[in-house]
Amino acid sequence: VSVTAPLRVFRGCAVREFTFVAQKPGCKELRITTEACWGRCHTWERPILEPPFIHRHHRVCTYSHIRLLSARLPGCLPHVSPLYHYPAALQCHCSGCSTLDTECETF
Amino acid sequence: YDGLAPGCHLFPFNVTIRSDRRSTCKGSHVLHACVGYCESSAFPSRYSVLVASNFTHNITSASRCCTISKDAKVKVRLDCPRGRHHDEIEILTAKACRCDMCRKSRY
């Protein structure tokens, strides 16, 4: 998916560059730039007559296809593996947040 | 919803309600839902999240969804055949909307 609209009015869900600091005990930190997901998904809440009285359609912009990558952290202690695994987005979509593999947070 | 700008907005819709055992009384009313496009993103989880989830949550989703932040009850008059009597039913309508915490949808 490519982002053709300006970000402030973009609607939908797209792959976007993301930089984070990889860290684990016994190694030095490493700044990694990868592909992640960002966007605005169509969501709604509507009153209904029957319990629970609100019908909702909540979807979040998340990974639909990933590639697992590995980085080598610097300065690791002899008994600590320097490998750090992280997901890179190949494709993103609007979908429910699955607590099986995802930490679902608000901001 | 094509004309909707990013954000979460009141959206009118018409409901027709039927009551009594034979559904012979009915009434219509314009209610409001909350509909829109709220921001969300998904990215590799921090190491603390990986440890807390036993390395199952390698993705973090930080999301907001369109929610009803304020509602009100409205009375809808249901007219019955031959105008002999009428019923009244209370239903909810949205009064204000906000991009807020996403919740599990019921389907």
Image (cartoon, coloured by chain):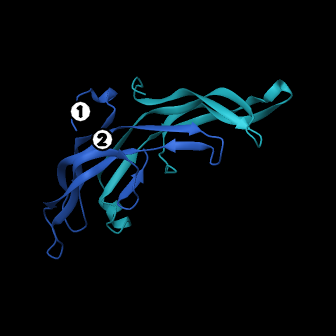
Chain colours: A blue, B cyan
Left/right placement of residue A4 relative to residue B28 reads left
Can I make out residue B72 in this image? Answer: no
Quarter holding the N terminus of chain A is top left
Left/right placement of residue A35 relative to residue B36 reads left
Which secondary structure, mark 1? loop
The quarter of the displayed image where residue B77 is located: top right
What label does residue A38 carry, if any?
A: 2
As rendered, which of A68 and A107 lies closer to the eye?
Answer: A68
Q: How many numbered circles are shown?
A: 2
Q: Subunit of mark 1?
A: A
Q: Amino acid at mark 2?
A: Trp
What label does residue A81 carry, if any?
A: none
As rendered, which of A91 and B102 lies closer to the eye?
Answer: A91
The quarter of the displayed image where residue B74 is located: top right
Q: Amino acid at mark 1?
A: Val
Left/right placement of residue B82 relative to residue B1 reads right
Horizontal and vertical percent position of residue B3: 40, 23
- The reply to the same-chain question for discs 2 and 1 is yes
What label does residue A3 carry, if any?
A: 1
Horizontal and vertical percent position of residue A85: 20, 62
When the figure is inspected, residue B45 is found, relative to residue B99, above or below; the finding is below
Horizontal and vertical percent position of residue A9: 33, 27
As rendered, which of B95 and A32 lies closer to the eye?
Answer: B95
Q: Earlier in the sequence, mark 2 or mark 1?
A: 1
The quarter of the displayed image where residue B79 is located: top right
Horizontal and vertical percent position of residue A43: 45, 38
Q: Which residue sits furthest bottom?
A: A79
Left/right placement of residue B22 relative to residue A53 reads right
Q: Which residue sits furthest top?
A: B3
Q: Which residue sits furthest right?
A: B84
